[in-house]
């Protein structure tokens, strides 16, 4: 009993105080316990509000997953790397086939060629091909091929009166795809100004006529016989007459006359090349209408 005796050294009033404190603690804990469980209400998991809330949470999860996935931007399939290929869903073998093809300095220019080289499945090709972006010149080339085939099919059965471009009528020119009433009349008018086409390249000088259309013209027409052009003597021609040359403007006309005054007389028409800043690219056309006697 001597062991327990020190624990009871407190007097009676102190022991009563300790007892009262313990009692109060127990009562407070009882209140807390009862209040906690009484505040919990039964939740009906089948309510419309809970269902709508759960649906909203699910949609937010989907948006988060979608945002985490890498977005695919338009790209040139010729420059797919290993990392990019894996993102797109290509196998290592498919990526290696493309890389080996590129090592030969070759390019795929369509989704069909891409599948032929990589051997990807139709489903994967359908999924990623909308993001393929090839250079503009390839697209224009494909469009040109399509238009050429289409135009050939349109005029193959049309009849022309002659194959000589210098004798063709406006109606003859209109069988060419891309040449309507306005262009056909413009070609005739320019041909008259030139006194006839002497060079194929002169047709491209018709204002507004694209090279693609010019090329189509020469699939049906050619210069069968060069025109007989009345040439003017460079040593006696007047300023006004020389200015009528379709390839000589006012400034060049002044230079020619100044040079003629300087040398007194040109012995050969090729002396025109000695004039400072003479347009050598037009020489072959200019001399179609000039000579030196």
Image: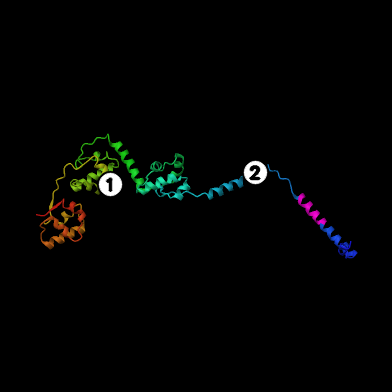
Foreground: 4 or 100? 4
Which residue reaches farthest left?
A: 293
- Residue identifier under label 2: 51
Residue 201 spot, x, y in % from top left? 22, 48
Residue 100 spot, x, y in % from top left? 38, 47
For label 1, the crowd category at 10 Å Cα-Cα, with few meaning under 14, some 14 to 19 and many 20 or more, is few
Q: Is mark 2 on a helix, strand or loop?
A: helix
Q: Which residue appears at 45% of the width and 47% of the height? A: 85
Instruction: Please state which of the two labelled residues, at mark 2 or mark 1, is closer to the viewer.
Output: 2
The stretch in magenta equals 26-38
Q: Which residue appears at 14% of the width and 53% of the height? A: 290
Residue 83 spot, x, y in % from top left? 46, 50
Q: Is mark 1 on a helix, strand or loop?
A: helix
Evaluate whether residue 133 shows in this view: no
Foreground: 277 or 64? 64
| Display colour scheme | rainbow
Horizontal side, residue 108 vs residue 28: left or right? left
> From the image, which quarter does the N terminus lie in?
bottom right
Q: In which quarter of the image is residue 212?
A: top left
Evaluate whether residue 152 shows in this view: yes
């Amino acid at each position: 009993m001597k062991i327990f005796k020190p624990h009871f050294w407190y007097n009676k009033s102190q022991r009563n105080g300790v007892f009262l404190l313990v009692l109060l603690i127990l009562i407070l804990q009882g209140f807390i316990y009862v209040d906690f469980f009484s505040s919990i209400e039964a939740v009906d998991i089948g309510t419309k509000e809970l269902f709508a809330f759960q649906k909203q949470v699910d949609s937010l999860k989907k948006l988060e997953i979608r945002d985490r996935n890498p977005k695919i931007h338009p790209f040139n399939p010729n420059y797919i790397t290993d990392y990019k290929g894996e993102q797109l869903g290509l196998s290592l073998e498919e990526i290696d086939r493309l890389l080996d093809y590129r090592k030969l300095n070759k390019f795929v220019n369509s989704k069909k060629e891409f599948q032929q080289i990589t051997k990807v499945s139709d489903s994967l090709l359908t999924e990623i091909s909308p993001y393929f972006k090839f250079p503009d010149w390839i697209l224009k080339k494909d469009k040109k091929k399509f238009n050429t085939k289409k135009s050939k099919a349109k005029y193959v059965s049309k009849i022309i009166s002659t194959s000589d471009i210098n004798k063709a009528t406006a109606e003859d020119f209109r069988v060419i795809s891309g040449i309507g009433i306005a262009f056909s009349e413009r070609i005739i008018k320019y041909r008259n100004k030139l006194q006839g086409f002497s060079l194929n390249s002169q047709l491209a000088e018709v204002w507004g006529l694209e090279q693609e259309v010019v090329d189509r013209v020469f699939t049906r027409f050619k210069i069968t016989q060069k025109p007989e052009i009345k040439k003017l003597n460079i040593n006696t021609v007047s300023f006004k007459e020389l200015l009528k040359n379709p390839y000589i403007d006012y400034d060049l006309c002044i230079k020619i006359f100044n040079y003629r005054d300087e040398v007194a007389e040109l012995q050969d028409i090729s002396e025109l090349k000695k004039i400072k800043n003479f347009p050598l690219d037009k020489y072959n056309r200019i001399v179609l209408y000039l000579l030196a006697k």
